[in-house]
Amino acid sequence: MRRPVPAVEALLAVALLVAGTACGSRLPESDFEGRGTAPAPAGGAPVRVGIITSATSPVGGAAFTGPRDGAKAYFERLNARGGLAGRKVEVLTCDDGGSGVGNNDCVHRLVEERRVVALVATSALDYAGAARVSRAGVPDVGGQPIGSAYDTYPHLYGIYGSLAPRKGRPGWGGKLYGGTEVYRYFKREQGARTAAVVSYNQAASAAYARLVTRGLKAEGYKVVTEQVDFALPNFRAAAADLKEQGADLVFDAMDTHGNARLCEAMDDVGAKVTAKVTNVQNWTSTVGDDYKDAPRCRNALWATGSSRNYEDTGHPAVREFRAAMKGRALAQWQVEGWAAAMWFTDAARSCAVLREGDITRACVDRFMDRNNSYSARGLLVPVSFEHRSEPPTSRRTCMSVARWQDDHGWVTQGGDMTTNCFDVPQLSYQP
């Protein structure tokens, strides 16, 4: 299990400041759609699952839809092959608009009105309805830990697992823990010694930058911090300084637009680095367009995560995923949504093994709440859920690493993710 340091959470918080806060309102019926609603075969009524996505959030339409799209592709394929014991999986999607009010409305509709067996591949900017999902005993399978909900409540099972007690308070005493494996990797495998951390002069961005700086220093790096004005950022000055300081790596606490502008500035001043490190949310096939004006920096982009690179076509599970996506633009979050749907499917199939006679919330929850590792046929670094009373001080953590190359896309680095492992300290942070 690898609970990542919260890069995505911090960057999304920053992006929200650019777009403004969603006020939230009751969702129109058009935002709550049934998917895969073909008449059920003789096997019985459809198995109903829900997917909550901040598809129209202030961050932008494409920011959160990857997990949903991957899960839907999996269920479409499953239904084409006969469903679950002859029963179709009926997928109900709900767009919460990126607001807490909208999220609570989606939870009410899916959990209380439509009585879904489970939620799958949740990707919500503000998971305000998480406590309601937990109180209802509805398993939430393979959601993205954009906030702290998956380390807070029972019945919620994030895609990266959790060691936390999950008794209604985040982590241990309100603190979560993340490892330094990313920094260890670049030090050991790429010989990096100096790292730059670029942030905005804004609270969420600065807080994340401090966390990255702390982890880098724990791994023995010289750290160069660069802060740019949120309203009028001077990326060229930051790029020139990190060049002058001889930075091997560049980490950031900024939104995608800021990242692209920083990369452009780095190219303009001739800053050459071993790696410009990004996160799994930006591990997409659209990098060529997103960074079109920064070819040198673009080809120094590296991403790290806990799922198998969608470019690893030598792996049968990856080939199956890509075939189902039917030529669409690909993203690593789609792989994780696909894995979440597979996870639910395996849990649902366990109900028949237990001879309960039906696929129930309780049955699916029992399958999920085991201290057994799960890898989604090799698509995930093995995931487990424990209820440790004390936080870990160190852990052996494994990760996937990829580098963007214009002629090849994301190329896997460092060997297989199940052997690309490090014994690293776990650092606490406030969610």
Image (cartoon, rainbow, N blue to C red):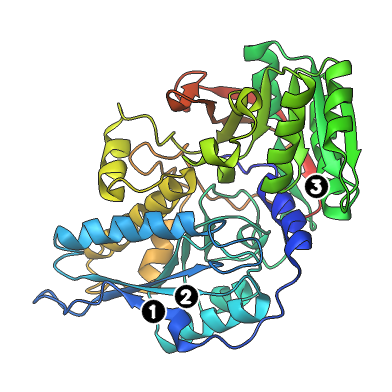
225 horizontally vs 46: left or right: right
195 horizontally vs 55: left or right: right
User: Disc 1 versus disc 3: distance between alpha carbons?
Assistant: 38 Å
Give yes or no for contact between labels 2 and 1 (Cβ–Cβ under 8 Å). Answer: yes
Q: Picture coordinates of residue 335 (x, y %)?
A: 41, 46
Three-letter amino acid code at disc 3?
Tyr
Q: Picture coordinates of residue 178 (x, y %)?
A: 70, 40
Q: Which residue is mark 3?
A: 429
Q: Note whether 74 is above or below 238 in the view shown.
A: below
Name the residue: 63% across, 34% down: 293
Three-letter amino acid code at disc 1?
Glu
Quadrant where the C terminus lies? Answer: bottom right
How packed mark 2 is, by other alpha carbons closer than 10 Å (few <14, some 14-19, many 20 or more), is: many
267 horizontally vs 288: left or right: right
Q: Secondary structure at mark 1?
A: strand
Q: Which residue is mark 2?
A: 94
Q: Which residue is mark 1?
A: 33
